[in-house]
């Protein structure tokens, strides 16, 4: 199935942000598509990833875009936030603005990790020189020869020009100013501002420009006793981002195809609506961002020129905004007159005897300043024409300027030559595409372009793996469904699924091995995302899901794409979306055992969310013919039968499954429920202990089976046995992560309300073994339920309130069940027993929606009984206990009932 792919070579010219982003995508795309690649990253800068924008070490220089929009990956929006959390900044939120130098470290680290991950497929050469020319001596369709500043050359099949924005031209300034040693044409050149920033220097400074570059320079040069003057055509500083940003508001009216006057009027109406409804114009403008490139493309050249002349400055002031903290500092400088702005231009300049410059302004004023700094920002032209590479390309016609002289002419990032052709394997991204896209200099736009360029440069080779007319037989999973991968990766995937179905250790490692053997294998990445999301496996879920989605687009059949869609909706969508996708998938592909496992609320997954549990039952029954009595399907059927209360039938089915596969954790789990619900506590405990020491020795959820055994011990009121089991099988160190919440934390609380655990409750040890992210931002309602139970056991009111706030902003089940449950548990902690009981009674009927088993959800009923008794509502407690005893024998419930006062 794996064709022999010739080695490819790509040169990326420029190693700033754009170059780093495209290099990351080239590495990942080459690995995913199994394309051997020689990658040249060419830039004289000492460190890749920083470029001009992110090389500054000044902590006052912040990103102009919130951290939540600065991920390297367009399909993994939280990637930067997770990186910050791993690198000592766990409190940073998506709305925060972090330092630009920190972001440069992120880019460099992400690039380094991508290169390491691609080792064996991608060979990277970092050349710290300049490219002076790029020629195609063997014709435009052949490889490019890049001539370097050190006199050497390299050849590459494809070239990506990631050279960043063009330098502004100072030619329009008076010659006397341009030739003065007091003039700084490039404030970002190494050491350019050192003299002006010296603490001993108090001379006033003039900045030419009032945009974001001017703001950065003003922050750097601000000091008591100095006035920083800034002059530009409009004299306006950038607007500020909102302190508490609101979500973007898309325009309700169609905009594409409107003539510019009508488009201008409609956009003003749209901004006005946002201002009236939300009290802020920013959501309206932000809502235009996804369609800006389309709107620009729909305008004629004449309309674009009109827009630049009449609206360009106004657009830039509002579109390219300052961080709130920066805006506050700038406002303070303006109030104290340390920063003064003016409209107009510079008319003349002359050197004074004392060394200062006398600069004449368009309004007739003359300023005496020690330095003049060109802060007009990136130029709109095609490139820095002093750069020999761009100069040579434009002079020969291998590249041409874009409309109105904006950037260079491109088609989806590929450069046009003077004949309008795109025959050369020459791409660009970022600022040089302004003529094509207009807004193209921010990371959210560049990262999308980087992915598109990488996928275009490494276009998928045709599959010549089999002779014409001969159908290739693909490997299959355990249920006979075809897999779009090679046999070794398929074998690792089958092993992962098999271990997951048996509830045995090693599933995560097997799926990782499958993805490593074939990084383009969509199902392997999707399985990792699924078990990370639902089972608490140590997986970077968003990254795995993004990889799965990319792979599914490139190499997957309809069934595999459907499975990836199911996982995506369960991770990122609403509960209803995830459930509906899963049911649709199993209706079409009933043999998909991994999908079926995810649908049934058993030991491994929380399953479908429905009030009466019938959805999972119907799925298991409907898929039975496709599985033909396979032990796994029989195990699931046993579990859903016991959930129906058909315990005798469930026990028979569980024994049948165990006879066929003694290691079946699902069958043993169903049998554990049967024993508990039937009151066979001694038999159940003995069977569990025997299985745990035998076939279940390699089980991945041993703590949960130990929890089941402890339930039997609680029911027979064997307090010493509960403590022994806790110490040997359920204490932190033996159990961590989600299982510590689901099993260890819930057991301790049940033991406390059952009056079985006397003395200090070691609940703090449980909390310390669980990551704060799992405890306060659980991904599923099932995990959230157990987080709430554990926090209640710890008496942690602030923790419960943080969890409630998360639930209110999460999926529907968390909003409607977990959030009110947290509120009820707060009353438990505060010993407001009557109110706690009232709220718990109201929640109990909908508790099934959180998933899991009745035995797991029973912890809420136990809490309700405790609250009823504590509130003096003994008749209500008596009725509930009697109903439970009618359902199953329990020495503990009998004693509790007998102890209730009449």
Image (tube, helix red, strand yellow):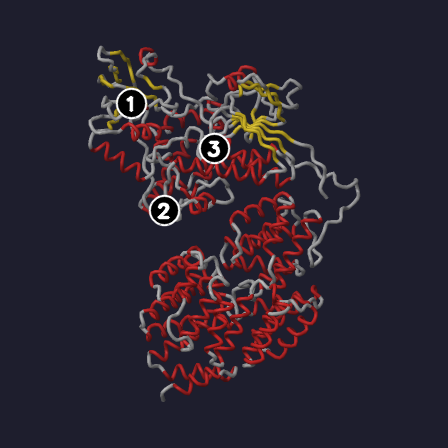
The x and y percentages for residue 283 are 37, 43
On screen, residue 619 versus residue 326, left or right, reads right
User: Residue at point 65% right, 39% down?
Assistant: 34
Label 2: how many residues lie within 10 Å, few (<14), some (14-19) or many (20+)?
A: some
Label 1: how many residues lie within 10 Å, few (<14), some (14-19) or many (20+)?
A: many
Secondary structure at badge 1 equals helix
Question: What residue is disc 1 on?
Answer: 196
The mark that comes first in sequence, 1 or 2, is 1
Q: Is residue 327 above or below residue 52?
A: below
Whether the residues at callouts 3 and 1 have beta carbons within 8 Å, the answer is: no
Q: Nearer the viewer, residue 695 or 564?
A: 695
Secondary structure at badge 2 equals loop
Q: CA distance from mark 1 to mark 2?
A: 39 Å
The mark that comes first in sequence, 3 or 1, is 3
Question: What residue is disc 2 on?
Answer: 246
Q: Quadrant of the N terminus?
A: top right
Q: Which mark is residue 49?
A: 3
Q: Quadrant of the C terminus?
A: bottom left
């Amino acid at each position: 199935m794996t064709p022999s792919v010739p080695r490819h070579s790509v040169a990326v010219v420029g190693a700033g942000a754009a170059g780093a982003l495209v290099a990351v995508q080239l590495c990942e795309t080459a690995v995913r598509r199994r394309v051997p690649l020689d990658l040249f990253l060419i830039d004289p800068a000492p460190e890749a990833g920083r470029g001009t924008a992110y090389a500054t070490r000044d902590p006052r220089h912040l990103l102009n875009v919130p951290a939540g929009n600065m991920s390297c990956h367009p399909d993994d929006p939280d990637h930067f936030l997770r990186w910050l959390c791993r690198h000592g900044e766990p409190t940073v939120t998506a709305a925060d603005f972090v330092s630009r130098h920190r972001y440069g470290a992120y880019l460099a680290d992400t690039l380094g990790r991508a290169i390491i991950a691609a080792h064996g497929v991608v060979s990277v050469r970092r050349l710290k020189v300049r490219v002076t020319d790029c020629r195609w001596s063997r014709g435009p369709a052949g490889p490019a020869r890049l001539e370097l500043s050190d006199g050497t050359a390299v050849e590459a099949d494809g070239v990506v020009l990631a050279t960043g924005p063009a330098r502004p031209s100072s030619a329009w300034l008076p010659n006397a100013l341009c030739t003065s040693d007091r003039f700084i044409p490039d404030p970002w050149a190494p050491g350019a501002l050192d003299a002006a920033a010296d603490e001993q220097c108090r001379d006033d400074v003039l900045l030419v420009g009032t945009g974001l570059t001017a703001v950065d320079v003003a922050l750097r040069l601000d000091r008591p006793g100095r006035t920083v003057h800034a002059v530009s055509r409009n004299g306006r500083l950038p607007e500020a981002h909102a302190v508490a940003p609101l979500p973007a508001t898309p325009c309700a009216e169609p905009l594409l195809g409107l003539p510019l006057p009508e488009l201008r009027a409609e956009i003003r109406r749209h901004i006005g609506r946002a201002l009236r409804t939300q009290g802020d114009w920013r959501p309206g403008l932000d809502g235009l961002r996804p369609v800006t490139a389309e709107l620009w493309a729909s305008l004629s050249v004449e309309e674009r020129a009109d827009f630049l002349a009449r609206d360009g400055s106004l657009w830039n002031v509002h579109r390219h905004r300052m961080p709130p903290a920066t805006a506050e500092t700038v406002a303070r400088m303006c109030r104290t007159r340390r920063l003064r702005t003016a409209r107009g231009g510079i008319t003349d300049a002359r050197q004074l005897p004392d060394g200062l410059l006398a600069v004449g302004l368009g309004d007739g004023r003359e300023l005496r300043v020690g330095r003049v700094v060109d802060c007009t920002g990136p130029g709109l032209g095609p490139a820095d024409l002093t750069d020999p590479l761009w100069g040579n390309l434009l002079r020969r016609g291998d590249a041409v300027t874009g409309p109105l002289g904006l950037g260079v002419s491109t088609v989806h990032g590929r450069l046009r030559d003077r004949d309008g052709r795109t025959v050369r394997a020459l791409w660009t991204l970022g600022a040089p595409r302004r003529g094509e896209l207009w807004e193209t200099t921010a990371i959210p736009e560049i990262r999308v372009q980087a992915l598109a360029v990488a996928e275009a440069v490494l276009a998928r080779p045709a599959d010549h793996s089999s002779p014409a007319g001969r159908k290739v037989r693909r490997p299959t999973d355990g249920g006979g469904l075809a897999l779009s991968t090679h046999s070794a990766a398929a074998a690792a995937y089958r092993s992962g699924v098999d271990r997951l179905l048996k509830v045995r250790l090693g599933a995560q490692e097997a799926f990782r091995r499958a993805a490593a053997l074939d990084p383009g294998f969509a199902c392997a990445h999707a399985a990792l995302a699924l078990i990370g999301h639902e089972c608490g496996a140590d997986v970077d879920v968003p990254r795995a899901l993004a990889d799965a989605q990319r792979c599914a687009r490139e190499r997957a059949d309809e069934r595999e794409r459907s499975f990836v869609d199911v996982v995506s909706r369960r991770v990122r969508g609403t509960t209803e979306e995830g459930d509906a996708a899963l049911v649709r998938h199993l209706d079409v592909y009933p043999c998909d055992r991994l999908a079926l496992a995810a649908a049934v609320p058993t030991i491994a997954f929380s399953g479908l969310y429905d009030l009466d549990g019938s959805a999972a039952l119907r799925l298991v029954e409907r898929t039975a013919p496709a599985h033909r009595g396979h032990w796994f399907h029989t195990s699931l059927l046993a579990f859903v039968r016991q959930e129906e209360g058909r315990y005798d039938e469930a026990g028979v089915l569980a024994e049948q499954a165990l006879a066929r596969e003694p290691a079946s954790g699902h069958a043993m789990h169903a049998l554990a429920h049967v024993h508990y619900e039937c009151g066979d506590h001694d038999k159940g405990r003995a069977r569990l202990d025997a299985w745990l020491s035998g076939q279940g020795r390699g089980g991945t959820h041993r703590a949960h089976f130990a929890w089941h055994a402890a339930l039997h011990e609680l029911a027979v009121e064997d307090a010493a046995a509960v403590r022994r089991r806790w110490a040997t099988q359920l204490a932190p160190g033996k159990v961590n992560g989600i299982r510590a919440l689901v099993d260890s934390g819930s057991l301790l609380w049940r033991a406390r309300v059952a009056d079985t655990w006397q003395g200090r409750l070691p609940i703090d040890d449980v909390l310390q073994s669980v990551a704060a992210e799992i405890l306060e931002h659980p991904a599923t309602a099932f995990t959230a339920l157990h987080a709430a139970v554990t926090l209640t056991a710890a008496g942690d009111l602030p923790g419960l309130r943080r969890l409630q706030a998360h639930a209110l902003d999460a999926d529907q089940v968390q909003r409607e069940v977990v959030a009110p449950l947290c509120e009820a548990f707060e009353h438990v902690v505060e010993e407001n027993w009557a109110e706690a009981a009232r709220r718990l009674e109201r929640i109990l009927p909908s508790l099934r929606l959180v998933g899991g088993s009745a035995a797991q959800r029973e912890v809420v009923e136990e809490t309700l009984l405790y609250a009823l008794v504590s509130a003096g509502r003994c008749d209500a407690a008596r009725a509930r206990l009697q109903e439970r005893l009618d359902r199953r024998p329990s020495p503990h419930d009998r004693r509790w009932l007998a102890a209730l006062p009449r």
